[in-house]
Each structure stands twice: as C-alpha cells, then as structure tokens.
Image (tube, grey):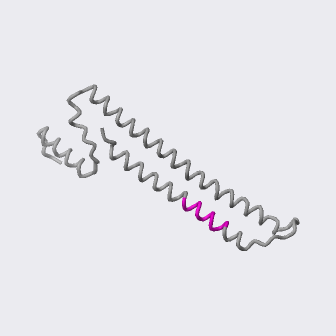
Amino acid sequence: METNPVTTELYKRGHELVDKFDYFVCGVTGAVFSYGIQHYSPRKIAFDFYSLEPLSLLLLALSFYFGFLRIAQSSLVANINHKWADAHDKAEQCARILADPASHEKLTGQLVDLDWIKQERLRARFKNGRCQS
C-alpha cells in the first residue's frame, strides 16, 4: 500500500515552513554573535555598560547552539510524526478493506481539489435525477 499523497504533501509543507523559520532565527543569531565577537575588546571588570558585553556574547552563543539543537530535534520529531501518520493511513485502509473487501477498488489515494468535488456533485445530481444547480 502506498502512502496517502495528502498526508505526504501536508508533512512536506509544514516541515519546510518550520525549518525555514528555525534556520532564519539561527542564522540571525549566528550573524549577530559573529559581528559582536569581531568588535569585542576585553576590558577590566567593572559595574558599567561594558561589563554586560561578555554576558551578551555568551547568551548569543548559547542561543545559537540551542537553535541548532532545536533544528535537529524538530527534524527527528517530524520524521517520527510522518512515519506515524503513514502507518495510521495504512491501518485505516486495511480496516476499510477488512470491513468491505469490495471497497479496495474505491481507495485510489488521489488528491482532491475543488474541481473534482464539483464534478462529483454534478455526477451525483445527474445520478439522482436532479439536473438543477
């Protein structure tokens, strides 16, 4: 049995959007960190504005590191979710076939769009003897 194309397409689109955002945030953090590290000059520790600079650079480095960890874990979770959705679709199709063995011919796995729905409604109206819209 093949994977439902709708499930696969939804997985791909959602995963791409999340990845793009995560990459953007991680890239901006890395750029700000590298810019800050280039212009950093060590000073004596004092209670002024310049004493916050090493702390901010440390926090940016940690943010960059945890951003990469988030990207790796979200990729892993998305992969597990895709496998689960695929198994769920296949189990659902098997249950339908077991309930009605003749119904396996109806399961095509094609994508449904508005034009297809309109055509099916027209066919149903003509089949029922109603030709009004």
How far across and down, in percent of the image, does residue 14 sit? Answer: 45, 51
How far across and down, in percent of the image, does residue 59 sit? Answer: 71, 59
How far across and down, in percent of the image, does residue 57 sit? Answer: 73, 63
Above or below for 49 versus 72:
below
Quick check: 38 left or right of 86? right
Of residues 3 and 9, the one nearer the viewer is 3
**Residue at position x 53%, y 48% from top?**
74
Tell whether position 32 is magenta. Answer: yes
Above or below for 12 versus 54:
above
Above or below for 128 versus 57:
above
Q: In the picture, residue 46 is in which quadrant?
A: bottom right
How far across and down, in percent of the image, does residue 128 sit? Answer: 14, 38
**Residue at position x 17%, y 46% from top?**
122
Quick check: 106 left or right of 73? left
The part of the chain drawn in magenta is 23-33
Characterize the magenta stretch by its predominant secondary structure.
helix
Residue occupying the far left of the picture: 129
**Residue at position x 23%, y 33% from top?**
104
Above or below for 21 versus 81:
below
**Residue at position x 60%, y 65% from top?**
28
Tell whether position 122 is magenta. Answer: no
Quarter of the image that includes the N terminus: top left
Q: In the picture, residue 3 is in which quadrant?
A: top left
Q: How many marks?
A: 0
Of residues 99 and 131, the one nearer the viewer is 99
Residue occupying the far top of the picture: 99
Q: In the picture, residue 55 is in which quadrant?
A: bottom right
Quick check: 83 left or right of 25? left
